[in-house]
Image (cartoon, rainbow, N blue to C red):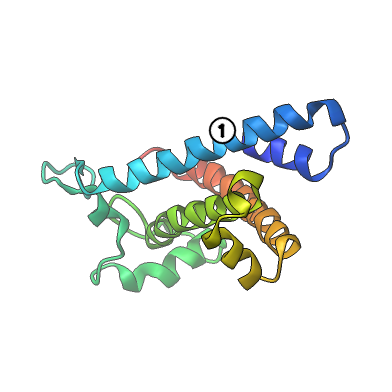
Amino acid sequence: VILIVTGFAIHFPYWPEFMGIARGLHIAFGFVLFINCLLRVVLAFIVKSAPTAGTREVVPDYKTWLPQADNLHQGPQWIKYYLFLKKDHPLSAKLGVPQKISYLCIPALIIFMFFTGLCLWPPCANMPLFEAAIAGLGGAMSMRIIHYFMMFVFICFMFIHVYLANVEGIA
């Protein structure tokens, strides 16, 4: 939420005295989100959890994120359920197929968002890797638009995530 608020404050500088604080908080919390994401991905290979409720079997956490062959066919049923086209809840393991796909995508999106943020941050913008990325995507303004658009992707994900967490309950 802090990244969203400070992102809007940076994009629409309606309060000039707040700009330095907004940028500092935005950069600090961007690093916190990125480091948290990297730790979670690494821990997914170390932490073990039960793939289904009521079992004592434990598997590495990353296996509960991946759609398995035995439940991949449930994807369309989950989408129908989430769109209120199907009344009964599809059977699943710890996570449904759409959850697994979104939990695979979110770390990649966070890393991409962090990268675009570094491209826009003046201390990094002149480094060769970031200069090449800026040039490759059409300039700094294109990079800003991509970074700004990604914020709305995260806002949509956040609202959907909160809604489904409350509808589905805690697994």
Q: Residues within 10 Å of mark 1 (few under 14, many from 20)?
A: few
Name the spot of residue 41 as percent of width and height, x first.
33, 48
- Place residue 102 in its image quadrant: bottom left
Mark 1 lies on a secondary structure that is helix
Name above or below for residue 157 compared with residue 70: above
- Place residue 130 in its image quadrant: bottom right
Q: Residue at x 19, y 44 (%)?
A: 46
So how many labels did they put on this image? 1
Question: Label 1 amino acid?
Answer: Ala
Taking depth in this image into account, of 79 and 157 the one nearest to the observer is: 157
Residue 72 in view of the camera: yes
Name the spot of residue 87 as percent of width and height, x first.
49, 60
Q: Please state if 19 lies on the left or on the right of 100 as rendered.
A: right
Taking depth in this image into account, of 102 and 149 the one nearest to the observer is: 149
Q: Residue at x 71, y 27 (%)?
A: 21
Name the spot of residue 2 as percent of width and height, x first.
63, 33
Quarter of the picture containing the N terminus is: top right
Q: Residue at x 49, y 39 (%)?
A: 33
Name the spot of residue 70 as percent of width and height, x first.
23, 69
Q: Please state if 36 lies on the left or on the right of 11 as rendered.
A: left
Residue for badge 1: 28
Which residue in the rendered view is the most extreme toward the left? 57
Residue 1 in view of the camera: no
Q: Please state if 81 lies on the left or on the right of 57 as rendered.
A: right
